[in-house]
Amino acid sequence: MKAVIQDRYGSSEVLRVDDVAVPEPGDHDVLIKVHAAGLDRGTEHLMTGKPYAMRMVTGLRRPKNPISGRDVAGSVVRVGSAVTRFAAGDEVYGVAPGSFAEYAVGPENKLAHKPENLTFSQAAVVPISAGTALQALRDVGKLRAGQEVLIIGASGGVGSYAVQLAKILGARVTGVASAAKADFVRSLGADHVLDYNHDDFADGTRHYDLILDIGGGSSLRRLRRALTPRGTVVFVGSENTGNITGMGRQLRGAMMSLVVRQRLALLIAKERASDLQVLTEHLQTGRLTPAIAESYPLAQAKDAMRLLEAGKVRGKVVILPKD
């Protein structure tokens, strides 16, 4: 089968398309014919091997799994002997490491049946980004209806879902994005949009019960200044926070939370079918809508990654096994 692979860590230049063997599912796994795969920020981290601490798990000198991609949507080809929720022919979506390929294997506990009203492309861009947004708002942020929420990075993959989910949960939402992406963020349902080049979210005009800092680089002081006295910051992602652990600012925030009334919390997202079931309900009712920026065939996966590296993605990008 054709797949996007890499033999070493690096920028998008390390990616190439080559022939590899079709993977074999384990007892608890599902073999999926990939119809579409989503590009998420985590895939970029796996490509670069940064922050370096992650290489303890992914491979010290080169990736243990050379095939890129994690988000997936497709049809079940074969299931492992212990799988009970899926059968051959089922349409599924979820997480399958190595999804930038014609076939991929995903664990049963990270997959769900695809919402019937979504195309494969739409479903493929949901699992990781929307699941991360849901956990940040609901599980760590403890969001309640009527609260004021600030989402820094509102136009990206996680941010585009966070805006919609925060509105579903009854919050008033302010999104931070570039001026070029302001209309997009408004279309997601944001009540207010701030241009990060000109507007200061910490100028004291408004205070927030919850701030989602998605891959941002704002100082802890500025974040706290924008919070209510007992507000919460949830750190999502590790962009611009160092190459070693990628969590220096987040860890300082967690320590600060021990001595102040405000809470600065680190999200460690989990990939699980139970969250996909919650998302499926919102997707099927139309309350939650995937925002697809562009689609690329496998042969152009490098170009898609360049777009993500440059920070030019508005919503999500889809990788298609077939042109």
Image (spheres, helix red, strand yellow):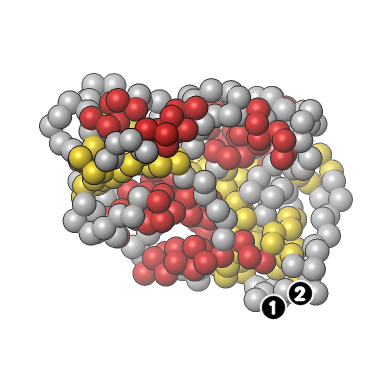
Going by the numbered disc 1, the residue's amino acid type is: Thr
Number of other residues with Cα within 10 Å of mark 1, as a class: few under 14, some 14 to 19, many 20 or more:
few
Give the image location of residue 25, x and y in percent: 80, 62
The residue at the point 60 percent across, 34 percent down is 44
| Vertical position of residue 34 compared to residue 203: above or below | below
Going by the numbered disc 2, the residue's amino acid type is: Ala
Which is more toward the observer, 267 or 180? 267
Check disc 2 and report the residue beneath it.
Answer: 82
Which is more toward the observer, 99 or 234? 234
The residue at the point 55 percent across, 53 percent down is 270
- Horizontal arrangement in the rendering, residue 122 relative to residue 90 (left or right): left
Check disc 1 and report the residue beneath it.
Answer: 84
SS for dot 1: loop
- Horizontal arrangement in the rendering, residue 195 relative to residue 244 (left or right): left
Give the image location of residue 288, x and y in percent: 37, 59
- Horizontal arrangement in the rendering, residue 269 relative to residue 222 (left or right): right
Give the image location of residue 85, x and y in percent: 65, 76
Q: Does the residue at mark 2 contact the one at mark 1 (Cβ under 8 Å)? A: yes
SS for dot 2: loop
**Whether residue 210 is visible:** yes
Q: How many labels does the image show?
A: 2
- Horizontal arrangement in the rendering, residue 113 relative to residue 314 (left or right): right
